[in-house]
Image (cartoon, rainbow, N blue to C red):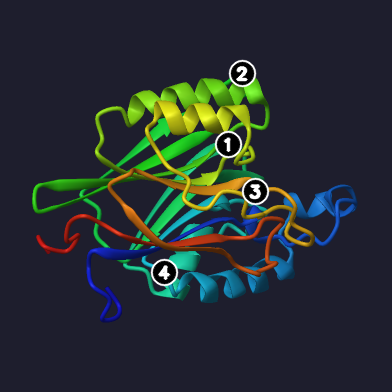
């Protein structure tokens, strides 16, 4: 860890970075759609700003990163952010690959060394969604962190939630974070919390759209064994989403075996 915080405490951040593109109003999804296909200078300056935000956290989950294609200037954005922000460990998962144009996916940046990393493909009629499962082990205990980006449609999300509930059914300590594309009070969120035995400590924190947030699409969910000390949405308009941050205390010392 980079400071004197107790090792049972973690600072978490989840951020959909829209491949480093900022958006200021809905019409820009159409008028600036070309920016999703080619490299633009603003993408790199946004990444630098994002990296400065990430540097204050221990474990970061990213969605809509580009792992190295034409539009990112063939830069792996996860590695770029990890290097710039000083993270010791980085793992990415490319889920939607469009030739050389786009390599779309999830990533985890961590100051703590994981014991295992597994990539899963999420079910759905349209391929291109995944979940990155990262396990941290210490003192005979295991913390499982899942980074994911769920489908736009409710039917697809419910299929994916069924998969996730089965995936974590035997896990005691779980942190699930990402762009879930549904509100805290949605039926599918209720299903997820119930079937996966997770809690949302601070529902209703608006994260989308970044310029006038009125919906919470980004969430950090935790097992009942994990104590949540603080949750907040950060005012960082480097994307069309705002990042959500959480400070947690684990029931064991994560660094006891290092």
Q: Which residue is mark 1?
A: 96
Relative vertical location of residue 153 with respect to residue 102 in this rendering, above or below: above
Q: Which residue is mark 2?
A: 125
The CA span between labels 1 and 4 is 27 Å
Q: Which residue is mark 3?
A: 216
Closest to the observer, 171 or 132: 171
Look at 40% across and 41% down and name the residue there: 132
Figure quadrant of the C terminus: bottom left
Lateral position of residue 147 relative to residue 75, left or right: left
* Of labels 1 and 4, the one closer to you: 4
Q: Are marks 2 and 4 in contact (CB under 8 Å)?
A: no
Q: Which residue is mark 4?
A: 57
* Of labels 2 and 1, the one closer to you: 2
Q: Secondary structure at mark 1?
A: strand
Q: Position of residue 179 (x, y in %)?
A: 57, 45
The CA span between labels 4 and 3 is 21 Å
Q: Secondary structure at mark 2?
A: loop
* Of labels 3 and 1, the one closer to you: 3
Q: Quadrant of residue 168?
A: top left
Q: Residues within 10 Å of mark 2 (few under 14, many from 20)?
A: few
Sequence-earlier tag: 3 or 1: 1
Look at 49% across and 66% down and name the residue there: 80
Q: Residues within 10 Å of mark 1 (few under 14, many from 20)?
A: some
Q: Quadrant of residue 55?
A: bottom left
Q: Residues within 10 Å of mark 4 (few under 14, many from 20)?
A: many
Figure quadrant of the N terminus: bottom left
Look at 44% across and 29% down and name the residue there: 194
Q: Are marks 2 and 1 in contact (CB under 8 Å)?
A: no
Sequence-earlier tag: 4 or 3: 4
Q: Secondary structure at mark 4?
A: loop
């Amino acid at each position: 860890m980079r400071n004197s915080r107790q090792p049972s405490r973690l600072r978490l951040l989840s951020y959909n970075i829209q491949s480093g593109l900022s958006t200021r109003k809905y019409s820009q999804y159409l008028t600036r759609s070309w920016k999703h296909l080619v490299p633009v200078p603003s993408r790199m300056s946004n990444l630098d700003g994002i990296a400065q935000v990430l540097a204050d956290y221990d474990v970061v989950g990213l969605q809509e990163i580009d792992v190295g294609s034409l539009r990112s200037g063939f830069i792996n954005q996860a590695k770029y952010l990890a290097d710039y922000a000083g993270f010791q460990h980085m793992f990415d998962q490319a889920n939607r690959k469009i030739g050389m144009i786009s390599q779309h996916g999830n990533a985890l940046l961590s100051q703590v060394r994981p014991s295992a990393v597994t990539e899963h493909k999420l079910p759905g009629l349209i391929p291109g969604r995944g979940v990155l499962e990262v396990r941290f082990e210490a003192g005979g205990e295991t913390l499982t962190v899942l980074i994911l980006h769920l489908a736009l449609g409710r039917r697809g999300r419910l299929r994916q939630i069924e998969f996730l509930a089965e995936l974590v059914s035997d896990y005691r300590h779980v942190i699930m974070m990402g762009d879930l594309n549904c509100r805290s009070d949605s039926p599918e969120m209720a299903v997820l919390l119930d079937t996966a035995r997770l809690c949302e400590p601070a529902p209703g924190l608006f994260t989308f759209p970044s310029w006038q947030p009125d919906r919470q699409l980004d969430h950090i969910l935790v097992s009942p064994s994990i104590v949540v000390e603080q949750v907040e949405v950060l005012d960082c308009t480097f994307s069309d989403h705002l990042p959500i941050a959480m400070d947690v205390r684990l029931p064991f010392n994560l660094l006891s075996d290092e």
